[in-house]
Amino acid sequence: MEVICSNHEGEFDSMVIRLGGFHTLMSFLETIGELMCGSGIEKVVETVYAENTVPHMLTRKAYSRSLRGHFLIYSALTSIIIADILKCSPQIEDNAD
């Protein structure tokens, strides 16, 4: 991508860069981390993961933890929204047994 962007003669203008699934996922996670930075997502993720891990999760370096963290946030927000729509309190289950 850097070669294509730095080429000023136009030899590679018709070239399309395609990322594989893994790199697409990493790019997506980094973009979400940048967009949500400062929104409180760091504090939410810190309730589950260590404080030193969170910056790595939001900058695509710890992709598996980041993916699990985003799924946890999605699940929590979905349950809060559905509880608000149904006018009830969200049910929290403790499966630590």
Image: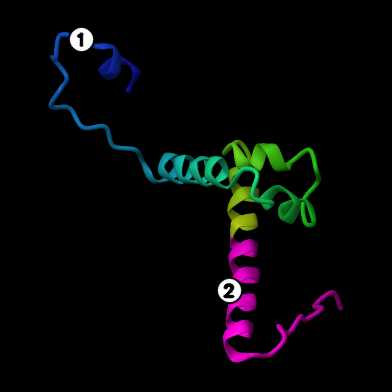
Range covered by the magenta-colored residues: 71-97
Compared with residue 22, is residue 75 higher up or lower down, i.e. above or below? Answer: below
Compared with residue 15, is residue 91 higher up or lower down, i.e. above or below? Answer: below
Q: Quadrant of the N terminus?
A: top left
Q: Which residue matches tag 2?
A: 78
State the image coordinates of residue 12 (x, y, percent, origin top left).
Answer: 17, 19
Q: Residue at x 73, y 56 (%)?
A: 44
Compared with residue 71, is residue 89 higher up or lower down, i.e. above or below? Answer: below
User: Tag 1: Cα neighbours inside 10 Å, few (<14), some, or many (≥20)?
Assistant: few
Q: Earlier in the sequence, mark 2 or mark 1?
A: 1
Q: Residue furthest right?
A: 97
Amino acid on which disc 2 is placed: Thr
Amino acid on which disc 1 is placed: His
Q: Quadrant of residue 47?
A: bottom right
Q: Which residue matches tag 1?
A: 8
Q: Secondary structure at mark 1?
A: loop
State the image coordinates of residue 6 (x, y, percent, origin top left).
Answer: 29, 12
